[in-house]
Amino acid sequence: MPGVANSGPSTSSRETANPCSRKKVHFGSIHDAVRAGDVKQLSEIVECGASINEVDVLHKFTPLHWAAHSGSLECLHWLLWHGADITHVTTRGWTASHIAAIRGQDACVQALIMNGADLTAQDDRGCTALHLAATHGHSFTLQIMLRSGVDPSVTDKREWRPVHYAAFHGRLGCLQLLVKWGCSIEDVDCNGNLPVHLAAMEGHLHCFKFLVSRMSSATQVLKAFNDNGENVLDLAQRFFKQNILQFIQGAEYEGKDLEDQETLAFPGHVAAFKGDLGMLKKLVEDGVININERADNGSTLMHKAAGQGHIECLQWLIKMGADSSITNKAGERPSDVAKRFAHLAAVKLLEELQKCDIDDENEIDENDVKYFIRHGVEGSTDAKDDLCLTDLDKTDARMRAYKKIVELRHLLEIAESNYKHLGGITEEDLKQKKEQLESEKTIKELQGQLEYERLRREKLECQLDEYRAEVDQLRETLEKIQVPNFVAMVGVLFNTFIFLKKKQYERVHTV
């Protein structure tokens, strides 16, 4: 991290110890305790009079800054709980959110957001935490901030947006994520540079290919000039980026498709699919892609490797901390994909990884350590080497957190009870009352409708009875007058016939 040494607690304030049998370490300052993730000594130091917002001499960091830097999530929560200043900035204008974004401490970023951190705050260069996450290639941290609703189109003093930073530093995963979130790749900076100009300038071929594939016209991209009159070819020549020059000057641009879109957008997935461990290592270790990068169908590098049974790729991904629990859009984990394609070795490897020591059928016992032992590091999926915590320390931290939950629930129950005894109504009671009123209203409406239908039915039955009585009466009348009416009708017809014949006879004789 620029301007920040990865320094741990000072050597004068701690004892050298074997991690397996570590002795009690006494820290000389609140910052050392936070950097080591020791929340017990943090609380003791504060109780002895240390300021919770004390600024260290060298870096001008507060304890909250150091907690965000080292990924000490328990210390960060403790500091926020006890009123640490979340808006305090360093000499470079960084808040704790900026530092967590730089370090890729995604859990710390999420905690800061939940406690009201301002992600729109800008440092002395005008960069927000979003800019810095894109700069350092922390796509998961970037996604957390995007989901919180922060605007990804904010510019810094050079009018660079996060997409410009991702393109300039070759962070393909972040670039893909930003494009998926609707960020424009056709916005220019103060010098008229598109993100594709910056990728060409720095020689980031994968980012360059991706940007070209997503632009409206590849020909127009190659002809687009910045304010200095330079296009991507000119920039690649000036900065001696032979890989960009070869790609531009190649036959791919002669009106043909450049490459398969998935290859352009997700080269890491292609490498994992082909079992190209060397390319996969290069892409991940150089920060071009994130190890948990997801393609359009939601699959990760592990899904691709598992589907083809590439054990070496899977072992390396597991070693690097890839998440095997991520599901694709079909709801499949990497182990499910391996099962589907009958790669038994991959299935065994992934299923052993997913085994959990916690027995889900039993209730959690806060005094039983085995329920709090699991794999992982508190605070982040990245930067895992900063905290000097043993597995036992991490388990103790989980137990303390759970006991705090139990304690706060008990206090909440007492507070709610007191509030109700004083005549207060809780939000839950209001919600239940509202639901009850709505239910009663619905029942009344249904009862009214039922009563209306009952009356209408009774009315129709009365009319039906009247019609039946009238039909019976008409039938009886018809039976009584049926024969006389027939005789009378025959007589009328006979008289009419005689009359017509008489008229015809008179007309003939008259003529």
Image: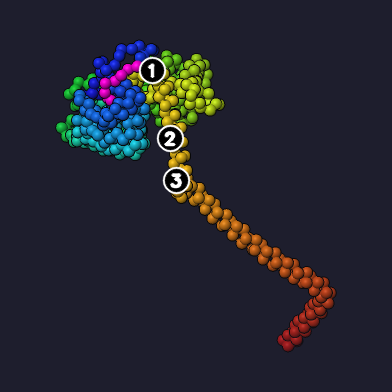
The answer to which quarter of the image holds residue 362 is top right
**Tag 2 residue:** 408
Closer-to-camera residue (114/53): 53
Task: Please tell me which of labels 1 and 2 falls first in the chain.
Answer: 1
Residue 295 on the magenta segment: no
Amino acid type assigned to the residue bearing label 3 in the image: Tyr
The answer to which quarter of the image holds residue 126 is top left
Q: Which residue lies at the image location 47% right of the left edge and 43% below the top edge?
A: 417
Marks 1 and 2, how far apart at CA:
27 Å
Marks 1 and 3, how far apart at CA:
43 Å
Please indicate whether residue 224 sits to the left or right of residue 179 in the image: left
Please indicate whether residue 218 sits to the left or right of residue 157 in the image: right
- Of the two numbered discs 1 and 2 in the rendering, the one whose residue sits closer to the viewer: 2
Task: Please tell me which of labels 1 and 3 falls first in the chain.
Answer: 1
Q: Residue furthest left?
A: 228
- Of the two numbered discs 2 and 3 in the rendering, the one whose residue sits closer to the viewer: 3
Please indicate whether residue 285 sits to the left or right of residue 127 in the image: right
Neighbourhood count class around disc 2 (C-alpha, 10 Å): few under 14, some 14–19, many 20 upward: few
Amino acid type assigned to the residue bearing label 1 in the image: Thr
Which segment did they paint magenta? 24-31
Q: Decide: marks 1, 2 in contact (CB < 8 A)?
A: no
Quarter of the figure with the N terminus: top left
Q: Residue furthest bottom?
A: 510
**Tag 3 residue:** 419
**Tag 1 residue:** 390
Closer-to-camera residue (102/471): 102
Marks 2 and 3, how far apart at CA:
16 Å
Q: Residue furthest front?
A: 48
Closer-to-camera residue (440/383): 440
Mark 2 element type: helix
Mark 1 element type: loop
